[in-house]
Image (cartoon, rainbow, N blue to C red):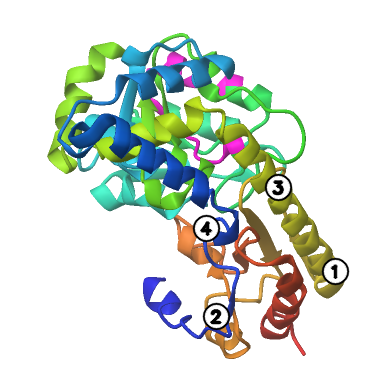
Amino acid sequence: MRELLSLAVDPEIISLAGGLPASSLLPLEDIQRCLDDVLAEDGARALQYSPPFEPLRQWIAAWMQRRGVACTSDEVFLTSGAQQGLAILSRLFLDRGDAAVVERVTFTGVQQVTAGRGAEVRAVPTDLETGADMDALEEALRRSPRPRLMVLIPDFHNPLGVSLTPEKRRRAAALAAAYGVPLIEDDPYSALRFDGEAVAPIKAHDETGLVFYVGSFSKMIAPALRLGWIVAPPALSERITVLRESLDLESSSLIQRAVYRFVSRGLLEPHLEQLNRANRARRDVLLGELAKHFGEDAHWTRPAGGLFVWLTLAPEVDTWDRFRSALARKVAYIPGAAFAVDGGARNALRLNFSNVPPGRIPEAVGRLAQALLPS
């Protein structure tokens, strides 16, 4: 997939392939002020090695509490992005040859920390309206040998755009408890909701300490911050810390302090309001254009937030094979097979709506239809 995307360097190509916000919507001036204030007020301390910034851990704990998670700062472990959180927890629980349960179509980063580490992957299907299939999940947990880990993406799934229902979240936490299998809740997108009411995370239903929450400021504020967190029991603190040190020692003290100033000054909420309002408008344009150009020839998800729409075409359409045809028409996407654990989803693709100006989305979808639909 990296090789394919390396071809999409033509500035005339409209890319629906990325997983990033529009640069014009990043809070550049606010972040600059926060960085300037950190350097002015904290001086060289902000540029040194240092332990995790406790005020930021306390803020995260309060943020989680507002979402229904009983959490203290002792349970918050800072990471260099959500992907590092996944990597740390994978190393904590998985050895080569152990079984892990993931969704059949899932974020490539989840695949990297399971199958990519030599795990025996048990893949469960995902309903495009309600999220991961809990009956299939339980069946995978029943099989011998018992899995050592499972991973779910609860909100605005990458790449599917779907969210787990509240009932399925409760059951997921109950299954982790019943079978004694740690569950990683990979949740970088929940703050990007632009429709409906917020739903409590799976971790809010955790009564046994077996749900491990992974969050990220990269999607909430700006990707280059590379700052995330894990919520895990304090009893695992030493093991998580040692694993973390083996990767990159610690997250940037400068960034931790700047992010704390950003969130503690009340800048996060208005930023998210602006970002989500813009993303809703872009999603609406994309969905309208899909209906116009694809109609009954396809079906697609209608995310209530996040960054992605999952488009499924007729079985005979291979979106991997047609990728070069799309590039020739100056449009890019991610073929569904890139996210399929078992090599399926070849007639599907992921579309990103957040990084394309609304005025260019109709042109992009028109080109897409020319590349993917029979003439």
Disc 2 secondary structure class: helix
Q: Where, by quadrant of the figure, is residue 144 drawn?
A: top left
Using the image, tell me which numbered label, if any, was put on residue 295. Answer: 1
Q: Earlier in the sequence, mark 4 or mark 1?
A: 4
Is 83 placed above or below 310 here? Answer: above
Tag 3 or tag 2, which sits nearer the N-term? 3
Classify mark 4: residues with Cα within 10 Å, few (<14), some (14-19) or many (20+).
Answer: some
Q: Secondary structure at mark 1?
A: helix
Say which amino acid is labelled 1: Gly
Q: Is residue 114 above or below residue 203?
A: below
The local secondary structure at tag 4 comes to loop
158 or 141, which is in the foreground?
158
Crowding near the residue tagged with mark 1, few <14, some 14–19, many ≥20 C-alpha atoms within 10 Å: few
The first of marks 3 and 1 along the sequence is 1
User: How many numbered dots are placed on residues in this image?
Assistant: 4
172 within the magenta span: yes
Q: Is residue 229 left or right of residue 321?
A: left
**Residue at numbered disc 3:** 303
| CA separation in Å, label 1 and label 2 | 21 Å
> Is residue 303 rendered to the left or right of residue 2?
right
Instruction: Please give the residue where the numbered disc 4 appears in the rendered image.
Output: 19
Amino acid type at mark 4: Gly
Corner quadrant of residue 102: top left
Magenta-drawn segment: 170-191
Q: Residue at x 54, y 48 (%)?
A: 27
Q: Position of residue 189 (x, y in %)?
A: 55, 41
Coordinates of residue 263 in the picture (x, y in percent): 49, 30
Circle nearer the viewer, 2 or 4: 4
